[in-house]
Image (cartoon, rainbow, N blue to C red):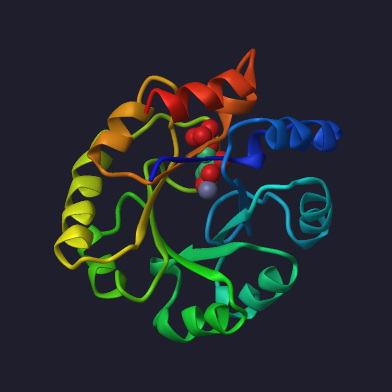
């Protein structure tokens, strides 16, 4: 699958409705929503108050990426707030299974995420328990960082594992994705590319989305 999920973190919050309309018109598949708590990551983004306008104005599925401690406290509220999928960090929790169950019980898709310094092997036991795994290709916390090249091998490894076991689990990549590396990422086995600054910082964001998707 070749899906593009622009990250609203890089949108213009003073003109959020305009940016969401652009996303609606574009070939983007999902809207990626980065929630940061200032504790799991050294940055604070936004929370529930923005879920409502995004659900209201955005016609694309909302792909929520929680960069927070204690995701078990909040996953259900994000499901109720209109998330299409909810992901949290494996390294933020002791046991992801009960939290995945909370999300599944809401009928929402699940995603497990790891930062670049977490061994990709740790995702393997959960590949058949989640709808998607998200490999961070920068350290979570900020948009506009440089893609970490070692991510390529991790994508290939997880792709192989998913294919070997005949699973449908999607692989999402987040951080430093742009029109120049999108094709290579898809070729390595990624299914979903998140792009913040490469979309909202582009002169023509719709064209940037189209390029990443069609040339990928
Ligand atoms: C980083 C976030 C990313 C971020 C990506 O912590 O998870 O989704 O918005 O931004 P770019 O595409 O600019 O690297
Ligand atoms: Zn993200």
Which residue is rendered at x = 46% and y = 31% of the image? 145
Which residue is rendered at x = 55% and y = 27% of the image? 209
- Location of the C terminus by quadrant is top left
> Looking at the picture, how far across and down is residue 94, in whole percent?
40, 80
Say which of 134 and 160 sits in front.
160
Residue 160 appears in the figure:
yes
Which picture quadrant has residue 102? bottom right
Please state if 208 lies on the left or on the right of 214 as rendered: right
Say which of 136 and 108 sits in front.
108
Residue 111 sits above or below residue 210 on the image: below
Which residue is rendered at x = 39% and y = 68% of the image? 90
Please state if 5 lies on the left or on the right of 45 as rendered: left
> Looking at the picture, how far across and down is residue 98, in whole percent?
47, 86
> Looking at the picture, how far across and down is residue 192, in whole percent?
43, 45
Please identify the residue farthest to the top as the structure is shown: 203
Residue 142 appears in the figure:
no
Say which of 190 and 166 sits in front.
166
Please state if 168 lies on the left or on the right of 13 as rendered: left
Please state if 160 lies on the left or on the right of 23 as rendered: left
């Amino acid at each position: 699958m070749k899906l593009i999920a622009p990250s609203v973190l890089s949108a213009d919050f003073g003109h959020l409705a305009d940016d969401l309309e652009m996303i609606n018109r574009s070939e983007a598949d999902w809207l990626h929503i980065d929630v940061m708590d200032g504790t799991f990551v050294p940055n604070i983004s936004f929370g529930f108050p923005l879920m409502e306008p995004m659900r209201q104005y955005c016609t694309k599925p909302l792909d929520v990426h929680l960069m927070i401690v204690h995701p078990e406290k909040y996953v259900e509220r994000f499901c109720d707030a209109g998330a299409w999928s909810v992901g949290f960090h494996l390294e933020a929790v002791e046991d992801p299974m009960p939290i995945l169950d909370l999300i599944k019980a809401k009928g929402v898709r699940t995603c497990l995420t790891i930062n670049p310094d977490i061994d990709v092997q740790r995702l393997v036991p959960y590949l058949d328990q989640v709808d998607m795994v998200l490999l961070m290709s920068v350290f979570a916390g900020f948009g506009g960082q440089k893609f970490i090249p070692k991510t390529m091998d991790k994508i290939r490894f997880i792709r192989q594992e998913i294919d070997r076991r005949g699973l449908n689990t999607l692989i999402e990549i987040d951080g430093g994705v742009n029109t120049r590396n999108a094709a290579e990422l898809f070729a390595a086995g990624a299914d979903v590319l998140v792009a913040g600054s490469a979309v909202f910082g582009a002169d023509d964001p719709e064209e940037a989305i189209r390029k990443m998707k069609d040339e990928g």
